[in-house]
Structure formats: C-alpha cells, structure tokens
Amino acid sequence: MQNRFRAISLSYKNAPVEIREVIALDESSIHSLLVKLKDFFSITDTLILSTCNRTEVYYSHELDISTEVIKLIGLEKGLTNVVDYIDYFNVLSDDQDAIEHLFKVSVGLEAQVVGDMQIANQVKRAYQASADLDMAGPFLHRLMHTIFFTNKRVVQETAFRDGAASVSYAAVELIEELTSNTFQPRVLLIGVGEIGEDVAKNMVHIPEAKVTITNRTFAKAQALADELGFDVIPFEECFEAMKSADVVVSSIMKSEPFITKALVKSMDIPSYKLFVDLSVPRSIETTIEDVPGVLLYNVDNIRSKASATLEKRLASIPQVEKIIEESIDDFFNWKKEMMVSPTINKLKNALEQIRQEEMARFLKNADEKQIAIIDKITKSMMQKILKVPVVQLRAACQRDDADKMIDILSDLFDLEKVSEKKNDA
C-alpha cells in the first residue's frame, strides 16, 4: 500500500480564537508531538504549523491516522476532552487536496490578511523543525523547496505581496518609512488590545527599533513584552515615556482624547515626533498637528492605504493561483517519476544479476583483456535493453497509467523475487 499525503487543519475559518488558543502548539510542543508521531506511527514527511490563525499537521502514511493525530495533540495539550474539538478540524485525505492546501497556506492565500508576509517564514521554521528530527524525506524536501520557489515567483511576478494589507501592517510600514533616517527609533506602544498586540508582533519588521509597551493591565503588557523581547512600563508612566519616544502608537479605548494638544505642547520636540492613533473613537486630539515637529496619522489614513494594497492583492489572486497550479503540476510530474523509480532500479538489478551470472559462468578461463571487452559489450547491451521500458514507464507516468506497466514488468522479470534475493544477500 502506498503512502498518501494528508492534512489536518484547524484555522480561523472554522474555529473561533478561544478554540484556536486551546489547540495552539508552541515550539517545544511541536518538537514533542513530532517525536511522538515518529515513535508511535513511524511517520516520516511530517510538518506541523501552528500560528495565531491555524494549527495544522501534514503527514505521509499508508493509513488515515488523522483522528489518532488529533488525540495526540490533545495529549500534548493536556486535554481530556479533545474529541469535543474534532469537528473544528478539517481533514484533507487526498494527496492533491492536501498539497494544494499547503501551497495556498504558504503563499498567503489562506491567511486572514490575504498575502500575509509572516506565513512564509513560519512555514520555513516548521520545515526546519521536521528536518532537524529527520522527519523530512525526499517527498517533503522536494515539496517544500517547490513551495519556496513558488513563493519567490509570487513575489517577483505579481503584486500579491506588495505593501501592507492590514491596519497593523500598514501602521508598522508607516513607522518604518518615517523613521528610516533615525538610528534605533524609540517606539512607545500604548494599549495591547487586539490591534495593539498585532502592531507589537509586527514590529519585528523594524528590528533596530527600541520598543516599549504599556497597558492598563500591566500583566498583559508584561507577558507580550517578555514574548517579543521588548521593554515594559507601568501605565501611569506612559506620559513621561512619551517625552523621549520618537513614535507614540495609541490604541486604547477612551471616550475622550487621551493625548491632548496641551500635553504635546509641553514636550520638548527637537526634530520630530510621530503619533499614530489606532483607536476608535480617537484617543489623540487632531489639533496636536499644530505643534511644530508633530506628525499625526489616524486609523482612517492607515486603513485607506491598507485597503488600496488589499485591492491590488485581490486583483493578483488569479495570477498567484496560476503560478501555484504550474508548480503543483511540476511537483506531481516529479512524484509520478518517483513512483516508477523503484521499478526501474529493480529492472536494472534484475538485468545486472543476469549479466553477472552469465559473465561468471562463461569467463572462468578468460584473461583480463577478454573480460574487460565482454564486460563493456554486455553493459552496453543492457543499457539498450533498458532504454525502451524506462522511456515507456516514464511516458505511462505522464498518462497516469504507470501501474499496469509496473505490474507487467514485475511479472515478466519476476522483480519481487530479484529484490528478495538482493535483500537476502
């Protein structure tokens, strides 16, 4: 029975955040789960991807062990009732469906923000984790490198990855643009609700920035700062921290402006100070722009930039899908050839065995020169005999008709018997 590539997916499309966070796997859990899959099921070609939007397991096995894999996830997470979560998982048991899904996820077609730039790196890290444990065989190696090449084509040939297509991405992109001439810009993030947290996580795209986080609930700011390697201050110190910050990002819920013109006017601004208001209703008075050196952007400015980018990305989807289709075709052509490679090798071994036996039988009394000539002639004959079935096998692959020819050649040359003899030797 041949191995089939399958996928188990729990994502934002079929599971709310409170379910996703229960199932989500950190780095150590992924490592532990990979080891369990290897030990319990002798699986190779396995990939585990876990982000804020999805937890997915891809694996090759002759049997469908998807339910067992979900139970192992539950065991890893300490869930006694993991069966209650099974309906949130989408299981793809067909090779083509699982491979196509992995391509779409890796490129960003399945992301909440279409064309998400982070997913490509997350997939690379997942692949590295498998490779480190020798859980990536020839199939997965080839598949992943095909995906990486596809990603390059998407970047080079389409507008699918151009610009920022979410408010948080767009805010970080704006900060990067406006602080490009500032050495190690000091960024203060006020409020780590959903959008504030997203901005914080996207600040990795400005690695030289010195980021400080503050929030009314200090523990939440502390946890996020620890995760991302940022500084954290108590909320009551944020006004003092604004004085030294180059960039202030506010995403707090307040009925009246939190940052006023009078407050900003009292600050010493030697060159510039950028304020980004991501709150709705707005938490920064619009009149602060009257203060020399102050730049203010609000959520509407940023959203219009993100929306324009998103339109470009959406317009690029047919082009991206065509590139993916071409890549999948190339991969399946390779996969088909891989299917006949064992038969070709068995056939070569069968003919070589016959050649060696006949050489040993008839050349007992021949000298070295005669043996060399006959060896060369018989090898050449063998290559010519092999040429036609090999060409026909590969042609049968392209027609999806290789199984019949494999059976005929196996019966004709008794290839299974030859293989057994070789293994016994």
Image: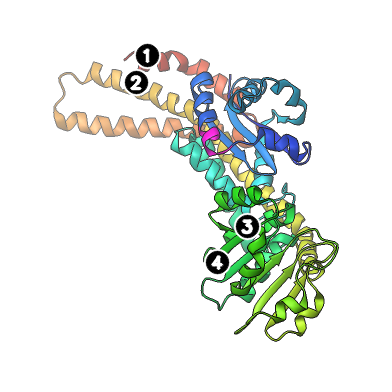
Counting from the top left corner in percent of width and height, residue 1 is at 58, 18
Q: Nearer the viewer, mark 3 or mark 1?
A: 3
Q: Earlier in the sequence, mark 1 or mark 4?
A: 4
Residue at (60%, 84%) from the top-left corner?
270
Q: CA distance from mark 1 to mark 2?
A: 10 Å
Vertical side of 72 occupied by 304: above or below? below
Q: Which residue is mark 1?
A: 421
**Label 3 Cα neighbours within 10 Å, binned few <14 / some 14-19 / many ≥20:** some
Residue type, numbered disc 4:
Ala
Q: Amino acid at mark 1?
A: Lys
Does the CB distance between marks 1 and 2 fall below 8 Å? Answer: yes
Crowdedness near tag 1: few (<14), some (14–19) or many (≥20) residues, C-alpha within 10 Å:
few
Mark 2 or mark 1, which is nearer the start of the sequence? 2
State if disc 3 and disc 2 touch (CB < 8 Å).
Answer: no
Determine whether 371 is above or below 309 in the image.
above
Which amino acid, mark 3?
Pro
Q: Name the foreground residue: 425 vs 359.
A: 425
Q: Where are the magenta residues, as a range?
A: 26-31
Q: Secondary structure under badge 4?
A: loop
Residue with the mark numbered 3: 234
Q: Which badge, 4 or 3, is on the more N-terminal residue?
A: 4
For label 1, the SS is: helix
Q: Earlier in the sequence, mark 4 or mark 2?
A: 4
Q: Between residues 95 and 79, which one lies in front from this camera angle?
A: 79
Please report the residue visible at 64 percent of the width from the left and 52 percent of the height from the top: 221
Most distant residue in the bottom direction: 292
Instruction: First in sequence, mark 3 or 1: give its number.
Output: 3
- Spatial CA span between label 2 and label 3: 79 Å
The residue at 70%/72% (across/down) is: 275
- Residue marked by disc 2: 353
Q: Is residue 55 magenta?
A: no
